[in-house]
Structures are given as C-alpha cells and as structure tokens.
Image: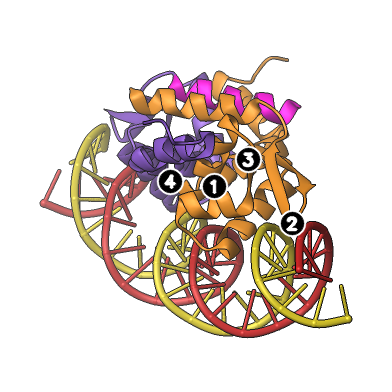
Chain colours: A purple, B orange, C red, D yellow
Amino acid sequence: METENSISRIQGAITRNSELFDELAQLYKIFADSSRVKILCALTQSEMCVSEISEFLSITQSAVSHQLRILKTSNLVKTRRAGKSIIYSLTDDHVRTIIDCGMEHIAE
Amino acid sequence: METENSISRIQGAITRNSELFDELAQLYKIFADSSRVKILCALTQSEMCVSEISEFLSITQSAVSHQLRILKTSNLVKTRRAGKSIIYSLTDDHVRTIIDCGMEHIAE
DNA sequence: TGAACATATGAGCAAATGTTCATATATAGG
DNA sequence: CCTATATATGAACATTTGCTCATATGTTCA
C-alpha cells in the first residue's frame, strides 16, 4: 500500500541513513577550521614537513602537530619520514575536489 | 629577482588569501553538524516547514529553529510564509553539489 | 654516547557550539 | 477578540574544540 507522502519518504531515507550523515558531518568538521583548510590546500600544491607548515601558518609547531594528527587520523593525509623531518602529503585527490567545491560556492 | 622556492610561493598564495580560507572554513562549519546536514539534504528533495523538519529529525522545534536560523543567516536557505507555517527551501543548488561532493568521498 | 634538531603528545584552559527550557511573536479560525 | 497553533529567540548549561605549555620520542651527527 502506498500511503506515504513525499515528505515521509524523504524522512525515511534520511532516518535510515542517519549514520551516513553523521559521517558526512564528521568529514566537513575537518574542513571547518581555517588552519586545517589552509594546510590541506597547501598540500594540494606540494608535500610539506611540519616546520614548513608551522612557519607559513604562523602558528606553533605543537598546534600544527595537533591539527595534522586530526588530518592523519581521518586519513586525509599520509606521512613519510625524511631524516629528522616528517613529510605530510594528501592521501588522495578528494580533498582538492572538496575544497574546489566550497570555493565555487563562495565565489557566488 | 626570482629567489622564491616552491613552498614560499604556496605560502604567499595562502597568506594573501587568508580571508578566503576563513570564509571557506565558515562554510564547512555549517555542514559540520549532522542535524544541519540532514536538514539541508532533506531540503534538496523538497521544501519543508519547521514542524515537518522537527518531526523527522526527532529534535525539538526550538532546536530546529535555532539551526534554521544559522542556515538562513548564511544564505543557504530562504523562507516564505504559508498561513501559520514558514516554509524553508534551498536558496540555490550549491548545497546539493557540496553534499554530493562529501558523499563521494565517504563512498571511497 | 650526547647534544641539537624535528615532531608528537598529554594536561589544562578559554572560547565556541548545540541543546533545552521558558517565553515572545505572529497567524488563522471561531 | 480570544484561543490554538506555528515559529522565533534569549538564557543557561554541558560538550567539544583548538590552543599553549611542558615534556616525551625519535633522528642525525660529532
């Protein structure tokens, strides 16, 4: 029987996929900080070590490390060691796409 | 003279556009809450009034109103009155694009 | 091995965020 | 007009967030 109206069909779809939206919000939360978004954008141009990032953001090495940990935990960046430095780079190109997508909205 | 290396060129680009990244982070902040992202996704399907949204999200009418105010202030949604109700809808299609963009990343 | 450099991490704190509760505003219908 | 219904808003509160400070871990090189 087809008693559902349009709204309740939408409600159903969203309620069923509730965890998916939690995940989505979680993803956007990572981009929701200007330091992190700057880091991510910089990494779309070139891999960088912690001190380079710290320098151009003008924030503490500690603060940068904390942010990078968030980015790494959420698998947006990966690391490799080069001597004393740890080089950070993007795991894939989705980050670039997401940033571009937001930029396009801002451009209006 | 061309003494800048690659990193400092990137640094320059990001430092010069610092406000742009603040704006970008601000935009993502709006999507960084599961209630809001659900509301926005629902509105990509159909316009809705406050009580409908409140019902399917299972959160207070007051909480929904507060969230909707955030969405309206940031110009992601617009309103029109229909009798006693206020009908909310998306101002444009960027919201859909941004959500799709995030979903695509989650799908991996 | 020990000193210097690079990065990571835990605790603590201030600011921001999202919800609830109580109440205000606004509209329709009797 | 008065009441019921729909929405908005301010205050209070608990939670989360991002930073700083101090310190730990790890690497290089003399």
- The stretch of residues the image draws in magenta is A94-108
* Nearer mark to the viewer, of 2 and 1: 2
Q: Label 1's element?
A: helix
Extreme residue in the top direction: B2
Contact (Cβ within 8 Å) of mark 2 with mark 3? no
Residue at the image position 63 percent from the left and 58 percent from the top: B65
Can residue A47 be seen here? The reply is no
Which residue does the numbered mark 1 point to in the structure image? B36
Closest to the observer: A75 or B107? B107
Q: Label 3's element?
A: helix
Residue at the image position 47 percent from the left and 51 percent from the top: B57
Distance in Å between CA atoms under marks 4 and 1: 24 Å
Q: Quadrant of the C terminus of chain A?
A: top right
Which residue does the numbered mark 2 point to in the structure image? B84
Which residue does the numbered mark 4 point to in the structure image? A67
- Give the chain of mark 3: B
Instruction: Specify few, some or many for label 3: CA neighbours under 10 Å numbering under 14, 14-19, or 20 or more.
Output: many
Image position, residue B56 (x, y; %):
47, 49
- Give the chain of mark 1: B
- Magenta: main secondary structure equals helix
Specify the amino acid type for callout 4. Gln
Residue A87 vs A61, above or below: the answer is above
Residue at the image position 53 percent from the left and 38 percent from the top: A7
Q: Are marks 2 and 1 on the same chain?
A: yes
Distance in Å between CA atoms under marks 2 and 1: 23 Å
Which of the two labelled residues, at mark 1 and mark 3, occupies the earlier sequence position?
3
Which residue does the numbered mark 3 point to in the structure image? B27
Image position, residue B28 (x, y; %):
57, 40
Specify the amino acid type for callout 2. Lys
Magenta-drawn stretch contains A41: no
Which of the two labelled residues, at mark 2 and mark 3, occupies the earlier sequence position?
3
